[in-house]
Image (cartoon, rainbow, N blue to C red):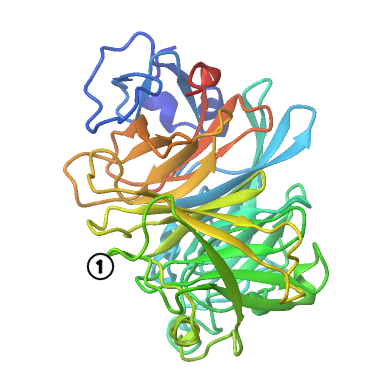
């Protein structure tokens, strides 16, 4: 179905049903390289949005400025996103918006909020709710239609990524350590929980025991309820949060940082010397952190001094069966990025230091930006591969969606014709639809196609 600019620019209903098939388009170079074949060459999108392999198509289900069901508009800076199963073929997508206090005009509100509006914080001078937060979308994967969309968290700063929980909510993370007194009236740098309640906004209560730092993403071990957290900093740590009560994060818990058993304070970045080799497994231990609200923004420095490992910009993290993967965006000697794999001991619930914790290994390290360049958000594909969203603004080519097979070899799946990052890749429960964002201007896509055609 051909889409013109007018169709793409109209309201939610038209955008939700606009399908674009890649089959009929002229083949174009990928603009990068694949180590393994993957799904094949990319086909140029004449609407200048998203190039996909033959057989795949996308629908624009939401875009910047569309009027949402609550009367607000779709904000800019769409970042991390999670997909939650609602049953009967319907899913909820919770989408972060990484907006700063200065970007109020790019937020969801177009008029002063009414009494009772839930907002964590307001601009110190303007008195207007801060624009960061989340929007929630209800999508029917059978009819391929967007049913509703609303503002679900507001008043936060730079909601970068997050993660879904086994109990059916989204954890939204602030990537900031801004304190009260500048543009904000409150301290920021927290995780917020967003439940799925039709048309309702979340209670904007920060989960302070999960630490105050440049949060990026989280994932939850469904067996233990332990939450794993990444930190976006050049000298970041990798954390875990042991809740007092499984599934009830607001009741508090204990924050810890990962350390190598044999090498205290190891530098995994490999920038200056090869400290970590691909494939080698290392036993780990976890260091208790104190003063986790870190008023001096020194949590990672104190953790490293106590023996915690350093990572280069921890970003996307995803749970996969009995293990997790997380991206280190600028890790590696060439600084093009790394992916780590952590396999926890299923008997380790964080409450007995005598129980071995697990092992960490370097799964991928890029030495060539043609194959992998600044991986950020990631998810697990139906075939067990990783789908990684690129977030680089240094190359002349645009960002890619990269598949990574089980041997750590990469292939190109998609390419943006808009010079912005991909973010928020996630799959529907049946594995037939992938949802992904373009960051700015905001676009959210639903991509369908022969996902089962690549297994190796």
Residue 304 position in % (x across, y down): 45, 82
**Residue 305 found in image quarter:** bottom left
Q: Does residue 109 appear anywhere in the picture? A: no
Residue 147 position in % (x across, y down): 68, 33
Q: Say which residue label 1 marks.
A: 273
Horizontally, is 165 left or right of 27 in the view? Answer: right
Residue 422 position in % (x across, y down): 40, 43
Above-or-below relation of 245 to 180: above
SS of the residue under disc 1: loop
Neighbor class of circle 1 (other Cα within 10 Å; few <14, some 14-19, many 20+) is few
Query: For the image shown, how many numbered marks are present on the structure?
Result: 1
Q: Does residue 219 appear anywhere in the picture? A: yes
**Residue 51 found in image quarter:** top left
Residue placed most toward the observer, 351 or 188: 351
Residue placed most toward the observer, 275 or 455: 275
Residue 371 position in % (x across, y down): 28, 38
């Amino acid at each position: 179905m051909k889409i013109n600019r007018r169709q793409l620019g109209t309201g939610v209903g038209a955008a939700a049903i606009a399908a674009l098939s890649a089959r009929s388009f002229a083949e174009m170079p990928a603009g990068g390289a694949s180590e393994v074949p993957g799904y094949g060459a990319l086909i140029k999108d004449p609407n200048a949005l998203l190039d996909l392999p033959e057989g795949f198509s996308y629908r624009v289900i939401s875009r910047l400025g569309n009027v949402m069901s609550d009367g607000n508009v779709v904000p800019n800076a769409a970042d991390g996103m999670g997909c939650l199963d609602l049953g009967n073929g319907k899913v909820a997508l919770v989408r972060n918006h990484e907006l700063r206090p200065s970007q109020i005009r790019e937020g969801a509100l177009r008029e002063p909020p009414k009494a009772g509006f839930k907002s964590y914080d307001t601009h110190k001078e303007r008195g207007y709710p801060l624009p960061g937060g989340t929007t929630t979308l209800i999508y029917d994967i059978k009819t391929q239609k967007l049913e509703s969309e609303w503002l679900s968290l507001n008043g936060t700063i730079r909601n970068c990524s997050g993660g879904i929980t086994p109990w059916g909510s989204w954890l939204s993370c602030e990537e900031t350590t801004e304190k009260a007194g500048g543009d904000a009236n409150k301290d920021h740098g927290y995780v917020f929980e967003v439940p799925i309640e039709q048309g309702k906004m979340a209670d904007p209560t920060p989960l302070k025991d999960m630490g105050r730092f440049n949060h990026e993403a989280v994932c939850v071990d469904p067996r233990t309820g332990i939450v794993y957290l990444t930190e976006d900093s050049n000298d970041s740590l990798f954390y875990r949060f042991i809740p007092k009560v499984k599934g009830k994060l607001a009741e508090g818990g204990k924050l810890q940082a990962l350390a190598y058993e044999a090498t205290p304070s190891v530098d995994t970045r490999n920038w200056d010397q090869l400290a970590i080799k691909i494939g080698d497994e290392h036993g780990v231990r976890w260091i208790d952190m104190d003063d986790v609200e870190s008023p001096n923004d020194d949590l990672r420095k104190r953790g490293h001094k106590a023996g915690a490992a350093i990572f280069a910009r921890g970003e996307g993290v995803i749970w996969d069966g009995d293990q997790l993967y997380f991206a280190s965006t600028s890790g590696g000697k060439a600084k093009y990025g790394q992916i780590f794999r952590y396999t926890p001991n299923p008997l380790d619930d964080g409450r007995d230091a005598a129980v071995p914790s697990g092992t960490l290994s370097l799964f991928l390290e890029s030495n060539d930006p043609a194959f992998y360049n600044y991986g950020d958000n990631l998810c697990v594909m139906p075939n067990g591969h990783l789908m990684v969203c690129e977030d680089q603004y240094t190359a002349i080519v645009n960002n890619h969606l990269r598949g990574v097979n089980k041997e750590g070899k990469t292939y190109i799946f998609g390419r943006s014709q808009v010079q912005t990052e991909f973010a928020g890749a996630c799959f529907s429960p049946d594995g037939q639809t992938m949802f992904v964002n373009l960051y700015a201007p905001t676009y959210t896509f639903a991509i369908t196609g022969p996902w089962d055609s690549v297994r190796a």
